[in-house]
Amino acid sequence: MKHIKNILRSVQQESPILYWVVIIHFLSAIGCVLGLLIDERTLIGVNVWIKPLKFSISGGIYILTVGYLMTIYPYSKTKKKIINNIVALTLLVEIGIIVYQGARGVQSHYNVSTPFDGILFALMGILIAVNVLIMILFVIDTARLKFSIPVSIQVAILMGWLVVVFGSWIGGQMISQMSHNVGVADGGPGLPLVNWSTIAGDLRIAHFFGLHGIQIIPLFALWLSKKWKTQNRNQIITVIVFGLLYATWIGYTFYQAKQGMALINL
């Protein structure tokens, strides 16, 4: 809890707008939980507030991650402010659309049933495309710039961004087929909360692990640096191996989904 407070304090000092967008996401998550308790409407087999809840939590974590990582990038204050504000405000609109469509009881993604829904879906695509471009910028700059942190952690951040870009590409695959399931229509039996299909392939699994690689791989590197006092070379090699194993897992879940196979067949 102390570490989380320190992260929030650092982000708040660096980018107040981004900080409050993170808070809005987490407040949205609380609101979605309340919605689950009082609203029994369902959409594609699950409560209408499940999807806004998942995206509120995931989006809040991602924006907070970007805000914290920006404190260690050797950018000018102006560049940091511009990037932070673009990420925060575009994803604020994104979650706003998802919550709004959930409250209406209609799909936010793949929904072109009316011109209005189609416009919202297209806008979401544009907002995500902007963020993917920023991810690519992070990949390039993490590879070429020197950070004032251990090299193993910088390598982990680079691998994290590479994995996130791949995870975003998987999101593009879902958009291209206008669904996330493979082999059956979206919906049907799924795992609790995440609702990943238990009867067919589900591209959301690889997408999920891909997008959260930017937290998991650097956190592993940070933990390793504290627990294993060894040469930098050994730290770097271990981080690279972990990153490759993590990427392999994502590749496997993507391949499995494309074959129409459920991660856990119940």
Image (cartoon, rainbow, N blue to C red):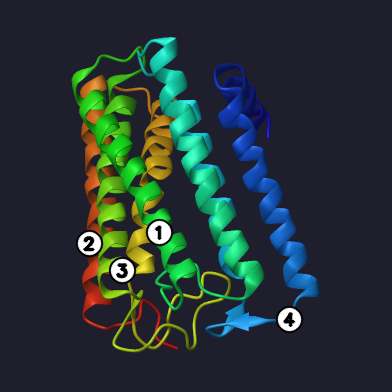
Pick whichever of labels 3 and 2 is earlier in the sequence: 3
User: For residue 40, which numbered disc appears in the image?
Assistant: 4
* Disc 1 crowd, CA 10 A, few/some/many (<14, 14-19, 20+): some
Q: Residue at (45%, 36%) from the top-left corner?
A: 87
Q: Are marks 2 and 1 in contact (CB under 8 Å)?
A: no
Pick whichever of labels 2 and 1 is earlier in the sequence: 1
- Front residue (pair 74, 219): 74
Image coordinates for residue 209, horizontal then vertical, percent? 37, 56
Q: Are marks 1 and 3 in contact (CB under 8 Å)?
A: no
Residue beneath label 2, please?
A: 251
Whether residue 110 is visible here, answered yes or no, is yes
Pick whichever of labels 4 and 1 is earlier in the sequence: 4
Q: Residue at (27%, 74%) from the top-left corner?
A: 177
**In this picture, is 51 found above or below 235?**
below
Pick whichever of labels 3 and 4 is earlier in the sequence: 4
Residue beneath label 3, please?
A: 174
Q: Which amino acid does label 4 sit on?
A: Glu
Residue beneath label 1, please?
A: 208
Q: Distance between the residues labelled 1 and 3?
A: 12 Å
Foreground disc of the pair 4, 1: 4
